[in-house]
Image: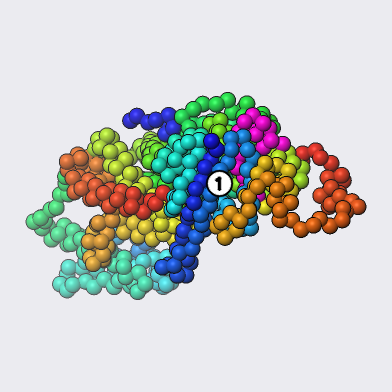
């Protein structure tokens, strides 16, 4: 049985400018995500990726359809669902003047549990920043800290909304490793991305969304075979990112 | 008060956020302290003496007596001298009035009324009302003495409240009410808008925390902050400015806490209405500004234009500051300030309903 099961999910908003008309931000999305998968949702801006995730996370009301996570109905038991999921949002700002260690303790307290913040910080390579304020972190560190916050309740499903957007190639690869490590321990991961390389390298399966609908779904290989045009002749050299990494190294910069 | 572990932790975090923000602590105390100090210094000093010049053209004892009496009066700072010189001073603004005593001043033999020429600067007419009665009194006293008449009436002023009522005593409870209003509205409304803008609210609500727990925690933290800040102001006033709170401290703090709850609700309402930091600033001003000037903080509502008094009296801050003032200055009991308490309670109901109605959870988180 899939850990996430979504049937005909819908979200409608009044059309801006004409309140009597509705438009569907999410229009009949159905998904089945297996335990232990890394599942990617791709699509242009405004395709409905974030809205779909927010409905699964209990942040946005579900206007139509059914979603269950770990057998719990999201519409009926949003608070139960919140206990078993971890969420990393696109915005990653936190309270001023509260350091990483304190924030992690706070998030644990919100689940009525206690954790050792240092263990969690070590997991995302931020032990040395325990006393730092989130605002002083680099982009990659912020994203890793966001993931640490999402792990305080040892979730079964981890949602990542564009986790690598705006990161340099080193930080991006470093984050992929973190995601793979978490996945190796059995965690199901659902992420949205604009980065095709990320989708291809990281995800077991992918759904491509546009205009609130899923227009294609499958493993990266399947999708490429089915939809991609014949590949051009193999390039003589790697791409510019290979150049960048050769010149600047793979070491993580922060 | 029993808080859940969640609420306790979140309350502690909100307190930490505030305590580590030294600048806002400084400013929330700085202005009340400055106001209190300035007004307590200025209101404890004697009324500044009015400068008058006297040109004494008469050489008799009555004139000398008159000058003597005025010189002794604390109300006046008397300079005697030449007419031309003193008039020049008057023009320069160094004298408020120049009195020219005629040569036949107090010369009863003449049988006529001696005319004293009072030269004034038209710009100073406001002071005339203050000076003239004293001059009249002084002249009357001299005349009686001269004619050997005992005064028929004497007014003895008895202060029934038997305590000094300086301006600072009036001002202080109002300033505290003002401080608690600012801290409460800023603490709930302004913070919510900021947390929403930064996406912090959204982040909090993917955890299992309930909206009510979040609001309770902010309200608890703010309540503690207000109590500590107001207590600091009271300590400052009592220890350094020698001001007494006559009524019961318990009653005083009761009104403070009630007022804080009302303004916290108003802050939550504003924070829900405003979508951006700019609009919360504007909305906040609409609520805060009229209350600063119309709630009888700096001057009594009675002294305002009559048409505005009914409105002024109904403002939430008016009820809070009046209640606090009556307890602090007149030793009123909670029973005696029942009208203020009733007013605060009505505002509590209104604000609470507005806050719960406006505080649409999903929108606040998005």
Q: Quadrant of residue A44?
A: bottom right
**Residue B251 forms part of the magenta stretch:** no
Residue range in magenta is A177-193
Identify the residue shown where x is 42% and y is 44%. A75
Residue A123 drawn at (x, y percent) = 66, 30
Residue A74 drawn at (x, y percent) = 45, 42
- Residue in the foreground of this view, choosing between A121 and B28: A121
Identify the residue shown where x is 18% and y is 72%. B113
- Residue in the foreground of this view, choosing between B270 and B132: B270
Q: Chain of mark 1?
A: A
**Residue A181 forms part of the magenta stretch:** yes
For disc 1, the marked residue is A31
| Residue B257 showing in the rendered view | yes
Task: Decide if residue A88 is on the left or right side of residue B210.
Answer: right
Residue A243 drawn at (x, y percent) = 86, 49
Q: Residue furthest left?
A: B152
- Residue in the foreground of this view, choosing between B152 and B80: B152
Identify the residue shown where x is 20% and y is 48%. B342
């Amino acid at each position: 049985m899939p850990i996430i099961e979504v049937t005909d999910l819908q979200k409608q908003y009044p059309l801006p400018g004409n309140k009597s008309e509705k438009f569907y931000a999410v229009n009949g999305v159905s998904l089945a995500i297996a335990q232990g998968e890394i599942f990617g949702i791709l699509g242009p801006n405004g395709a409905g990726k974030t809205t779909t995730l927010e409905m699964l996370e209990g942040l946005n009301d579900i206007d139509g359809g059914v979603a269950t996570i770990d057998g719990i109905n999201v519409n009926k038991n949003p608070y139960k669902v919140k206990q078993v999921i971890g969420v990393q949002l696109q915005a990653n700002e936190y309270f001023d003047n509260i350091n990483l260690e304190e924030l992690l303790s706070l998030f644990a307290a919100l689940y009525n549990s206690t954790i050792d913040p240092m263990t969690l910080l070590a997991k995302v390579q931020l032990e040395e920043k325990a006393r730092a304020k989130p605002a002083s972190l680099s982009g990659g560190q912020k994203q890793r800290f966001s993931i640490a916050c999402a792990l305080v309740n040892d979730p079964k499903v981890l949602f990542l909304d564009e986790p690598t957007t705006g990161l340099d190639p080193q930080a991006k690869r470093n984050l992929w490793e973190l995601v793979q490590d978490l996945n190796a321990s059995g965690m199901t991961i659902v992420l949205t991305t604009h980065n095709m390389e990320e989708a291809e390298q990281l995800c077991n399966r992918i759904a491509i969304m546009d205009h609130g609908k899923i227009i294609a779904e499958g493993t990266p290989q399947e999708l490429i075979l089915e939809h991609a045009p014949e590949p051009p002749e193999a390039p003589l050299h790697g791409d510019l990112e290979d150049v960048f990494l050769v010149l600047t190294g793979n070491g993580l910069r922060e | 008060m029993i808080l859940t572990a969640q609420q306790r932790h979140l309350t502690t975090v909100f307190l930490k956020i505030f305590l580590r923000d030294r600048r806002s602590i400084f400013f929330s105390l700085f202005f009340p302290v400055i106001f209190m100090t300035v007004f307590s210094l200025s209101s404890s000093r004697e009324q500044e003496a009015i400068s008058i010049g006297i040109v004494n053209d008469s050489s008799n004892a009555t004139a000398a007596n008159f000058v003597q009496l005025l010189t002794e009066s604390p109300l006046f700072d008397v300079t005697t001298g030449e007419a031309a010189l003193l008039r020049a001073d008057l023009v320069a603004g160094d004298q408020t009035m120049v009195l020219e005593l005629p040569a036949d001043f107090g010369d009863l033999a003449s049988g006529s009324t001696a005319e004293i020429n009072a030269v004034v600067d038209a710009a100073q007419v406001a002071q005339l009302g203050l000076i003239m009665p004293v001059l009249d009194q002084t002249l009357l006293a001299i005349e009686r003495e001269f004619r050997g008449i005992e005064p028929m009436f004497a007014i003895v002023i008895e202060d029934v409240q038997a305590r000094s009522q300086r301006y600072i005593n009036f001002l202080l409870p109002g300033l505290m009410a003002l401080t608690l209003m600012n801290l409460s509205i800023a603490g709930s409304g302004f913070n919510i808008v900021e947390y929403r803008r930064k996406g912090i609210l959204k982040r909090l609500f993917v955890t299992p925390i309930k909206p009510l727990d979040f609001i309770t925690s902010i309200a608890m933290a703010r309540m503690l902050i207000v109590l500590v800040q107001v207590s600091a102001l009271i300590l400052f006033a009592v220890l350094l400015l020698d001001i007494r709170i006559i009524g019961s401290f318990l009653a005083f703090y009761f009104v403070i806490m009630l007022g804080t709850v009302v303004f916290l609700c108003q802050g939550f309402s504003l924070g829900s209405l405003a979508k951006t930091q700019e609009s919360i600033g504007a909305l906040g001003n609409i609520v805060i500004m009229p209350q600063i000037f119309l709630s009888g903080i700096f001057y009594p509502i009675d002294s305002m234009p009559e048409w505005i008094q009914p409105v002024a009296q109904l403002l939430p801050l008016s009820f809070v500051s009046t209640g606090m003032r009556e307890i602090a200055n007149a030793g009123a009991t909670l029973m005696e300030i029942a009208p203020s308490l009733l007013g605060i309670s009505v505002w509590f109901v209104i604000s609470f309903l507005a806050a719960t109605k406006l505080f649409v959870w999903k929108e606040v988180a998005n």
